[in-house]
Image (cartoon, coloured by chain):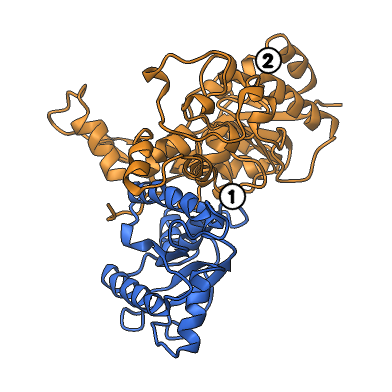
Chain colours: A orange, B blue
């Protein structure tokens, strides 16, 4: 009997999710034993046409990481969706847009102008921009087209399961692969991580007061932080209350507050709005000026509250022509 | 929707004890005000989850009006202060997302201020008319036009279906 086929693919991502797969360490041998990897651009030499030649639904699962922001990524997502029984959004970028999704605060034109003209490290006097097609001595070279909007995988194709995290932990990855191989799968659309806020598994949970009473906010580099005490109790923004657990509080154990990479729980529609609501409501100040002064300690609300999920948020992208 | 027939749509989140009662008073006093607001009654302005505001915009609201009791008068003591603090940060965040400050408005309107309901709503409608439509559902559709095979409709984050209603209601 042939082994079940699995594909790994990457779109707008940093490669950290590929690391997470490799981080299975010796467990990866068990995976390789149990499955046939048919596509894994970062590690193995299979080509697009190899997969295209396979019958539809012949791959058991594709684990796709990265957001969708180019025409090529869109095409590959559709192709892998057709070839796969299960499409899994692997990692924060595929699940909710991730760091690349922060580009949705700018227009494509603004981004290209910064990268190819204004960036302080640029040397591009001719102002050369990438083109989607170029003729060079009879050879026609092409590049994928950049989209105006960065998207989550499920805004482009149907997704069966989500594995959140930046990147997902080896433990959750191993559990997901195990579930796929055994066929013991939760309902379609499930996030393959616990459905409870990070605070629940945080080692500093006991020091989180019932009434936080923020008098000021400080960022981690502005403060000598108590290594035992809840970050919120110290006036440091921690996304824990609005973020799904399952990472076993990796960042907190590394003495940094949660930055929200697992996204919200199933009851949350918009992670950023939820943490905004929670933090602001718990201020001590009652006068407009005093409130504004305390909230000035959060200089970049969009980048702080939607660090991994702007494309999946209710507003999705900055309204062009606005402020 | 042509510009001639376009009227701003405002979602109003009014607290049960003050602003909703004031709107009631405006009604029984036969005070006329612009019919652009769809009022949702909540027990307290402190119940206004910022998700409600974002969801209203994402589903086609041009403006969101939150009405609560004057500071010190909250039926639940602290609710309107919570609303005020959220409003401050939400305004900043909306600004960063390109949404004009006039589109979100917080007003303290006591149960006796039926005339203030009229003044606030008429003024907000005027300001929104000057700004023009926000039309996020239309923008989402326009953005998704760049996809070769179209957007995936069933996504949890998919384009919300706008409420169907005639522009001149």
Image coords of residue A82 (percent x, y): 65, 45
Chain for numbered disc 1:
A
Q: Any mark on residue B145, and which?
A: none
**Farthest-out residue, left:** A125
Mark 2: few/some/many CA within 10 Å (<14, 14-19, 20+)? some
A19 or A59: nearer the eye? Answer: A19
Is the residue B147 above or below the residue B36 in the image? above
Asked if residue A57 is positioned above or below residue B141 in the image, the reply reads: above
Residue A322, given in percent of the width and then of the height, sits at: 29, 55
Q: Chain of mark 2?
A: A
- Nearest to viewer (mark 1 / mark 2): 1
User: Mark 2 or mark 1, which is nearer the start of the sequence?
Assistant: 2
**What residue is drawn where x is 41% and y is 56%?**
B143
Outermost residue toward the right? A1
Count neighbours of disc 1 (C-alpha within 10 A) and say few if under 14, some if 14 to 19, many if 20 or more.
some
* A316 versus B32 height, above or below: above
Which residue occupies 59% across, 42% down?
A79
Q: CA distance from mark 1 to mark 2?
A: 31 Å
- Residue A291 vs residue A265: left or right? left
Q: Residue furthest bottom?
A: B30
Q: Which residue is mark 1?
A: A269
Q: Which residue is mark 2?
A: A24
Residue B69 location, x and y as percent?
47, 63
Please count the marks in the image.
2
Secondary element at tag 2: loop
């Amino acid at each position: 009997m042939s082994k079940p086929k699995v594909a790994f693919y990457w779109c707008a991502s940093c490669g950290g999710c590929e690391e997470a797969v490799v981080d299975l360490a010796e467990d990866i041998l068990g995976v390789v034993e149990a499955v046939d990897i048919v596509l894994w651009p970062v590690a193995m030499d299979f080509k697009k046409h190899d997969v295209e030649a396979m019958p539809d639904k012949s791959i058991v699962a594709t684990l796709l990481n990265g957001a969708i922001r180019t025409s090529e990524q869109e095409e590959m997502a559709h192709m892998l969706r057709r070839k796969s029984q299960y499409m899994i959004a692997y990692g924060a970028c595929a699940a909710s847009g991730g760091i690349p999704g922060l580009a949705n605060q700018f227009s494509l034109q603004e981004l290209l102008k910064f990268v190819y003209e204004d960036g302080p490290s640029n040397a591009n006097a001719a102002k050369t921009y990438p083109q989607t097609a170029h003729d060079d001595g009879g050879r026609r070279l092409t590049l994928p087209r950049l989209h105006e909007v960065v998207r989550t995988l499920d805004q482009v194709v149907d997704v069966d399961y989500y594995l959140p995290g930046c990147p997902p932990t080896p433990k959750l990855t191993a559990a997901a692969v195990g579930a796929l191989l055994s066929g013991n799968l939760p309902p379609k659309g499930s996030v393959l991580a616990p459905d409870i806020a990070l605070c629940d598994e945080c080692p500093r949970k006991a020091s989180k007061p019932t009434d936080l009473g923020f008098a000021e906010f400080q960022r981690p580099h502005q403060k000598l932080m108590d290594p035992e005490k809840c970050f919120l109790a110290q006036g440091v923004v921690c996304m824990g209350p609005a973020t799904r657990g399952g990472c076993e509080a990796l960042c907190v154990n590394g003495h940094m507050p949660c930055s929200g990479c697992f996204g919200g729980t199933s009851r949350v529609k918009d992670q950023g709005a939820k943490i905004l609501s929670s933090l602001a409501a718990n201020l001590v100040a009652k006068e407009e000026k005093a409130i504004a002064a305390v909230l000035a300690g959060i200089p970049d609300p969009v980048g702080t509250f939607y660090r991994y999920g702007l494309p999946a948020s209710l507003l999705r992208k900055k309204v062009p022509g606005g402020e | 929707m042509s510009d001639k027939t376009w009227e701003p749509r405002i979602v109003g989140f009014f607290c049960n004890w003050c602003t909703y009662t004031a709107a009631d008073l405006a009604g029984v006093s036969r005070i006329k005000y612009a019919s652009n607001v769809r009022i949702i009654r909540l027990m307290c302005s402190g119940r206004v989850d910022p998700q409600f505001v974002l969801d209203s915009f994402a589903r086609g609201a041009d403006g969101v009006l939150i009405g609560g009791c004057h500071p010190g008068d909250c039926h639940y003591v602290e609710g309107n202060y919570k609303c005020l603090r959220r409003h401050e940060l939400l305004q900043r965040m909306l600004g960063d997302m390109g949404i004009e400050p006039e589109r979100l408005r917080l007003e303290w309107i006591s149960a006796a201020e039926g005339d203030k309901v009229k003044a606030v709503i008429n003024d907000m409608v005027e300001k929104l008319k000057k700004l023009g439509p926000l039309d996020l559902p239309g923008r989402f559709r326009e953005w998704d036009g760049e996809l070769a095979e179209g957007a995936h409709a069933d996504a949890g984050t998919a384009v919300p279906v706008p409420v169907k209603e005639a522009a001149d209601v």
